Image: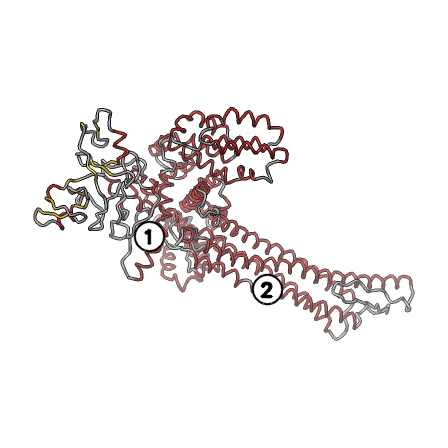
Amino acid sequence: MSEIKALEHATLKVPYEILNKRFRSAQKIIDREVDQVMNVSRQVEKALDAQQPPILSDMTKLVANVEQKLQVLKRKADESINDELNVTQICKRKLEHLKGIIPRSNGDVCLGSVDQWKRIRLDRLVIEHLLRMGYYETAEELAARSDVRHLTNLDIFQTSREVEDDLANHSTTKCVLWCIDNKSKLRKINSTIEFSLRVQEFVELVRQNQRFEAVKHSRRYFPAYEKTQLNEICHVMALLAYPADTDIEHYKKYTDPKRWEQLVLDFRHENYRLFQLSNTSVFSAAVQAGLSALKTPQCYSQTCRNLNCPVCQEDLNRIALKLPYSHCVQSRLICRVTGKPLNEHNHPMMLPNGQIYGRSALQKITKEDGTITCPVTNVKFTKPKIDKVFIM
Amino acid sequence: MGDEACVTVEKELDRVVSKLEQLHEIASAEIGDVASLMSQLVNVLENAEQMLVTTLNTGTQMNAPGTPGSVDDPMGETVNMQVETEPSAPQRLTESQMEIIRDAISKCNVRVQKLSTEHRDSHGAVSKIGKAIDRNFNSDFSSTMRVDALQDEDNLMLLNKAIAKHYCRQGMDEVARTLIKECKMSDNDAQDVFDSEREFAEIYSIWIQIQKRELTEALKWAIRHSTQLLERHSLMEFRLHRMRFMQLVSNGLESQHDAIVYARTNFQKFAKPYEHEIANLMASFIYLPGGLEKTPYKIFLAQEMWTELSFTFLNDACQLLGISKNSALSVVVNAGCTALPALLNIKQVMQSRQVLGMWNGCDELPIEIDLQPEFRFHSIFACPILRQQTTEDNPPKKLTCGHVISNDALHKLSNGHILKCPYCPVEQNAEEAVRIYF
């Protein structure tokens, strides 16, 4: 499995879902306008089929009507198909980027461009992670700074940002609009977000002591959910019987202002499901896998840390604590002085204290008088016996 | 890379695009066509009415010349409107007029319905894109993640810190600052972010400049570190000069003098290692009058050359300063991007053999991840006998003959005190094996 296959699902899936949505709304618009045309053209036909031939001036009006509706259809079809084409361009741009690394004619790729591509990928992954965490501002800024906006899903998350801000301000308006906008899709994934919103609205009415309004509200919105949510509806309705600052555990959870924060999270979750994004970001999967792939027991020993190793650095070290170590069936040894691999070109050698260094490193640290100070233990040896070590 | 998967998706996408373009064509041409047919009909009908009014007004009855109602019809039909001139009764259409309108209307009906059906039919093509994406790309990482690792607040904050450090390191302090504000990082942690290594920021800003095709700072840096660079056989300084020189040459004749002066001041110290290449570069003067666009020298100024140059700079400069050219975050994420495909592959095998989840309860990954050498930071010794990594409890031991095996293997292989080395004929005392450290 290649890296692109493994990691880039969301990059393509999100614009696809938008294309799909645009397609459906375009279909709706075209159908509606076609209906309009058909309506007026039917009137013409009716007039023509009447017992008496139609009156000239009436007919002029009817035909003019048809013409006008046709123009509207033409304009709207034009607009919505252009809309769809625009979205396909977004997909296309992303595909182009994914295919971006052009191998040189002699088969290997330019290191610089691969490096560049990976840099952009890191920025893309970080932006996705930031969006999922709700750090919109940072995501925007980063996208602008590193000029990767067209490769991210920022635009889509812009709407969700507005909804989230609205919810954070204890208002359901935008989220309800969002629910209506995505009604069929939400129904398909069995989402209960709209119900939660309606419950919240009800709770707010109760909180403001507008209990009659609350009843009205419940009558208007709750029946649609009686099949699936009857239990909860009953619980919520019982709120009517208690004061808004009730201490009863079961009802307190509804009146808790924290429920708004939960709604924000619920909304975010449903939004991912809508775009068929998994709940975890590629970034966090990559961070975990990467930490594991790099993690060695040495990273947790006091003496063997390597400052260049990410897992040896304090913060990442703590994150990696619960993750598995890397697996290794073939020895791979690195000289702690030069950082170069130990192999037949740089043979591993042992000082009398059991410390292993590469031949080239020993040459470097041997003083002119033949003394060597072990770089790790600081023990000094005068013309020590150095043994060759064989690693199979 | 993932070419084949991308190509599959692209094929489906292209199909949709051409379909949509076709529909666009239909919408503007065919619908436009019937619309203009209708408008002509309206014109004719209005003319007919007008004519009637005039005839009525002038009082001429009958014998009005058959009002010309024929129009150049794009549909190839002649609309001939004969106006009946009965003053008293409202004017009615003739049979032939009705026929023409009927035709036009039915044409219109067919066309608009065709637009709607064809658009609907393209749904199949659209959803095929989605299927191609789902089939060719992986969307599920749950098997390669530990749910608890990146969920709790503390770890997420540590991760935020790593992200902030990464951007701070690249001199994007504003990004780091915004993140710190948005995630409400504690002041201590924030301070820590800004205290982290700053040396890199200078290198990084020069790197950005090279990408913007601006060499001044880079050259300054290279000249400042010239001796060290030469010691390391770095290509960087010469390449920077080469690029600057080509920039001058590409300006054409007016820069000829500057280019020669530049070459004389800067190429001399590279005469030995780059003799051939300098000759090659100087030959570019032949093409100066005509510009470099159509010559072999064009390649020197291509985008890839700039990318490669900036990469060489970053690489060599970091090496010289002894700092890592990649931040911890980027090493981790790139290692992860290498590891994930392998882990996802093994997932399928493990599921088919009904092995339990790979991250639960295991303290090691199920497979070895083949990382680039630059991502290897620690020595790992895997016992060649037992095929497992050595640990504090089971350390590596050097036998007297120099071969290294793990302590466990040593115990398994020794008979009393006597041990025969598994790799050479030497028999030895097992007690004499020495613990070694990598």
Say which residue label 1 marks: B144
Quadrant position of residue B351: bottom left
In this view of the protein, which residue sits in the foreground, B158 or A362?
A362
Q: Amino acid at mark 2?
A: Glu
Residue furthest to the bottom: A51
Query: Is residue A2 something that shows in the picture?
Result: yes
User: Pointer 1 indicates a residue of which chain?
Assistant: B
Name the secondary structure under disc 1.
Answer: helix
Q: Is residue A332 above or below residue B193?
A: below
Q: Is residue B112 above or below residue B414?
A: below
> How many numbered marks have been drawn onto this rendered protein structure?
2
User: In x, y percent, where is residue A324?
Assistant: 27, 48
Q: Residue at x 76, y 61 (%)?
A: B40
Q: Residue at x 38, y 47 (%)?
A: B337
Residue B118 - label: 2
Answer few, some or many: residues within 10 Å of disc 2's Cα (few below 14, many 20 plus, some between 14 and 19). Answer: some
- Is A166 displayed left or right of B408 in the figure? right
User: Pointer 2 indicates a residue of which chain?
Assistant: B
User: In x, y percent, where is residue B435?
Assistant: 16, 40
